[in-house]
Amino acid sequence: MSELSPQAQEVFWAFNREASGKPDDWHHLPAIAAALRSAADQLDHATSAHTLYAFADELEAFAQ
């Protein structure tokens, strides 16, 4: 299994700290990815949206 990039890992850990207080609830990855895609859909700046889509792709792939 590949590892998450440092940026995607930080998004994942930040979510889990707020949601459960634990940095290892892997079952949340698809939900985090969906939230990132939704946020990206709302951005006007294409580069920022592309970055969020890339994080979402990475998190979804890691969850499988």
Image (cartoon, helix red, strand yellow):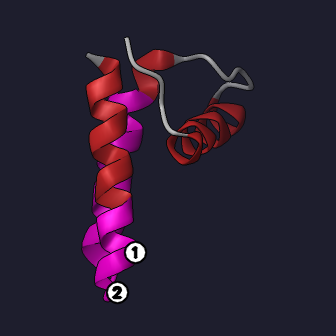
Quadrant of the frame with the N terminus: top left
Q: Nearer the viewer, residue 53 or 38?
A: 53
Crowdedness of circle 2 by 10 Å Cα count: few (<14), some, many (20+)? few
Cα–Cα gap, marks 2 and 1:
6 Å
Residues rendered magenta in the picture: 29-51
Residue assigned mark 2: 45
Taken as a whole, is the magenta stretch helix, strand or loop? Answer: helix
Whole-percent x, y for residue 46 in the image: 28, 81
Residue under the image location 41 percent in, 41 percent down: 32
Residue under the image location 50 percent in, 43 percent down: 8
Give the vertical position of 12 relative to 27 (above or below).
below
Whole-percent x, y for residue 50 in the image: 29, 67
| CB within 8 Å, label 2 to label 1 | yes
> Is residue 30 in the magenta section?
yes
Q: Can you tell which quarter of the image residue 22 is in?
A: top right
Quadrant of the frame with the C terminus: top left
Q: Amino acid at mark 1?
A: Ser
Q: Can you tell which quarter of the image residue 49 is in?
A: bottom left
Which type of secondary structure does the marked residue at label 2 adopt?
Answer: loop
Which type of secondary structure does the marked residue at label 1 adopt?
Answer: helix
Give the vertical position of 9 relative to 62 (above or below).
below
Horizontal side of 21 relative to 24 (left or right) equals: right
Residue assigned mark 1: 48
Whole-percent x, y for residue 3 in the image: 47, 23
Residue under the image location 31 percent in, 52 percent down: 54
Horizontal side of 45 relative to 22 (left or right) equals: left
Q: Can you tell which quarter of the image residue 21 is in?
A: top right
Q: Amino acid at mark 2?
A: His
Horizontal side of 9 relative to 54 (left or right) equals: right
Give the vertical position of 37 relative to 15 (above or below).
below
Give the vertical position of 25 relative to 43 (above or below).
above
